[in-house]
């Protein structure tokens, strides 16, 4: 995990240079100078393309049907994949690498496949994410993304060696629920301050820490 | 022909270092900065940073990998420095007070971190990194909402103007600051400094050489003798506490008893006594297997 964190950090730094020097269209550039803007609006592009698909309103709450359907579809594909031959081989390699190797599974290969799929899902996920917000952020914006996702899946009941689709759904609900409800409360406690940002740091990292304590050492011995 | 092969092997082995040095040289030439300035910067940087890097040795030896949570020690120090500034203790006195104040705080934090890391064996690196982020949250809570609000600070320049909380940057160079408290103790020009430190270095090397020779001679006599027979401490009667084949009544300088012994016939015993990092292969697959059965 420490290695993947640093791979992420270094690629973010590399892309910071890339966004500055790549010859891309003028629309996205700073008004002065070269390089792309930090935040680009997607209003004329694919903003809310999933949110507005078949959207309807119930009691003042807009239901983003397309977004939910897309999420459901992806969960279904994941569900099916985990029951395919490759998926099961991958899980065997994760549970007990020696046993999997002995039964003829190339554990290194399944690990690479897993990393590829995870990276691809992250890529599709950020497009869904940005169409929902209506803008995209470049440069150092993606740096903390992994930690937010990690705390969500861990609060949902996953550990560093075991995860299910239900953990994803429950975890995202709980984590975003804590953030949505916690921030206004914190702002009432200390008005007009950045305390909500501080609380977000504490909550999100505290959850990851808690989950890591469950991953090894005395508690699992 | 042989020389060429040697150079190639050397380059292959140290490719990263060589590339780094070349990069530095090219950048030095391209930057247009005077050589003296770069050297001055480099010396002060090395002395500043080496101390922080020193903090990483112990956790690596203890088998925890790199402790990214040293930032928490830095936070403990900043608490101390803040109060030294608030009390207005200047110079080396302030430096010593800050150091004395921060040691117990950092020690307490270290105790907590150590206990937490014991609960996440095998994940210490990412754990300490996340712990650093978490502590950063607590730190913001302390510096933005507790210091300057609940605990008032009176000296000017410590609190953000027109707001609450401690300022982002504190000036240590003003009267009552700590700037150059250590640097200014003994300053030398480059040339005398070169002579002084070269002399010190040679002196230390000479002392080291003499000590090593003495301890080698003794260890060969005793350690070699007792290890050569192969029996576990056969000639010491199994009673005396023998440390790696060197008798405790030998006046071998502390801290280097392993060196001569490893060169004798006793290498396996000495090697076994030194824990070389974490025995990764010994426990990780089994742990993983037991974890998965426990969670299934």
Image (cartoon, coloured by chain):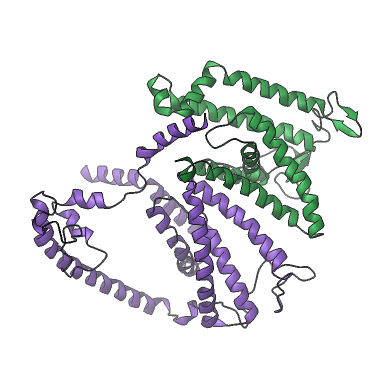
Q: Residue at horizontal 62%, vertical 49%? A: A206
Could you say where residue B212 lies in the image, as x and y percent from the top left?
19, 66
Q: Residue at horizontal 85%, vertical 23%? A: A54
Q: Return the residue nearer the eye: A171 or A6.
A: A171
The answer to whether residue B194 is above or below residue A55 is below
Q: Quadrant of the N terminus of chain B?
A: top left
Q: Residue at horizontal 27%, vertical 72%? A: B204
Could you say where residue A111 lies in the image, as x and y percent from the top left?
49, 28
Res. A81 in view: yes
Could you say where residue B246 lies in the image, as x and y percent from the top left?
16, 61
Q: Residue furthest top?
A: A85
User: Which chain is represented by green in the image?
Assistant: A
Q: Return the residue nearer the eye: B87 or B288.
A: B288
Q: Residue furthest right?
A: A59
Q: Colour of chain B?
A: purple
Is residue A109 shown left or right of residue A144?
Answer: left
Q: Quadrant of residue B86?
A: bottom right
Res. B180 in view: no
């Amino acid at each position: 995990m420490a290695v993947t964190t640093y791979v992420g950090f270094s690629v973010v730094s590399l892309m910071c240079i890339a966004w500055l020097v790549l010859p891309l269209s003028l629309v996205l550039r700073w008004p002065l100078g070269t390089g792309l803007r930090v935040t680009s609006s997607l209003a004329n592009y694919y903003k809310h393309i999933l949110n507005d698909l078949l959207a309807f309103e119930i009691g003042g709450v807009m239901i983003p049907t397309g977004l939910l359907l897309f999420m459901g579809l992806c969960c279904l594909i994941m569900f099916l994949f985990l029951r395919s031959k490759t998926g099961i081989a991958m899980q065997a390699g994760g549970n007990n690498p020696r046993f999997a190797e002995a039964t003829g599974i190339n554990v290194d290969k399944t690990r690479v496949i897993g990393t590829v799929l995870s990276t691809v899902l992250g890529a599709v996920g950020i497009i869904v994410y940005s169409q929902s917000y209506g803008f995209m952020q470049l440069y150092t914006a993606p740096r903390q993304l992994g930690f937010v996702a990690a705390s969500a899946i861990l609060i949902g009941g996953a550990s560093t060696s075991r995860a299910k689709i239900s953990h994803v759904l429950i975890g995202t609900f709980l984590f975003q629920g804590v953030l949505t409800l916690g921030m206004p409360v914190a702002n009432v406690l200390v008005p007009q301050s950045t305390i909500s940002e501080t609380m977000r740091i504490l909550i999100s990292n505290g959850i990851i820490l808690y989950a890591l304590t469950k991953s090894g050492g005395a508690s699992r011995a | 022909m042989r020389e060429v092969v040697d150079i190639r092997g050397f380059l292959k082995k140290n490719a990263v270092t060589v590339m780094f040095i070349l990069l530095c040289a090219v950048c030095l030439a391209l930057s247009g900065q005077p050589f003296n300035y770069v050297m001055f910067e480099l010396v002060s940087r090395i002395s500043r940073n080496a101390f922080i890097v020193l903090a990483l040795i112990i956790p690596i030896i203890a088998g925890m990998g790199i402790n990214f949570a040293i930032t928490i020690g830095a936070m403990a120090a900043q608490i101390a420095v803040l109060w030294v500034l608030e009390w207005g203790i200047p110079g080396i006195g302030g430096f010593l007070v800050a150091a004395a104040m921060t040691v117990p705080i950092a020690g307490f934090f270290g105790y907590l971190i150590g206990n937490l890391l014991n609960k996440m064996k095998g994940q210490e690196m990412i754990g300490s990194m996340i712990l650093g982020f978490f502590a950063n949250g607590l730190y913001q809570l302390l510096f933005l909402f507790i210091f300057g609000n609940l605990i008032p600070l009176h000296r000017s320049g410590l609190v953000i103007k027109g707001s609450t909380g401690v300022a982002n940057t504190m000036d240590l160079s003003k009267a009552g600051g700590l700037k150059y408290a250590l640097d200014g103790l003994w300053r030398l020009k480059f040339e005398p400094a070169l002579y002084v430190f070269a002399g010190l270095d040679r002196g230390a090397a000479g002392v080291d050489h003499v000590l090593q020779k003495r301890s080698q001679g003794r260890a060969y006599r005793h350690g070699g003798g007792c290890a050569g027979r192969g029996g576990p401490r056969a000639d010491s009667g199994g009673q005396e506490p023998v440390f790696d084949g060197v008798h405790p009544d030998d006046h071998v300088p502390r801290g280097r008893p392993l060196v001569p012994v490893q060169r004798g016939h006793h290498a396996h015993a000495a090697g076994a006594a030194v824990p070389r990092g974490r025995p990764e292969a010994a426990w990780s697959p089994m742990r993983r297997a037991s974890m998965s059965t426990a969670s299934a």
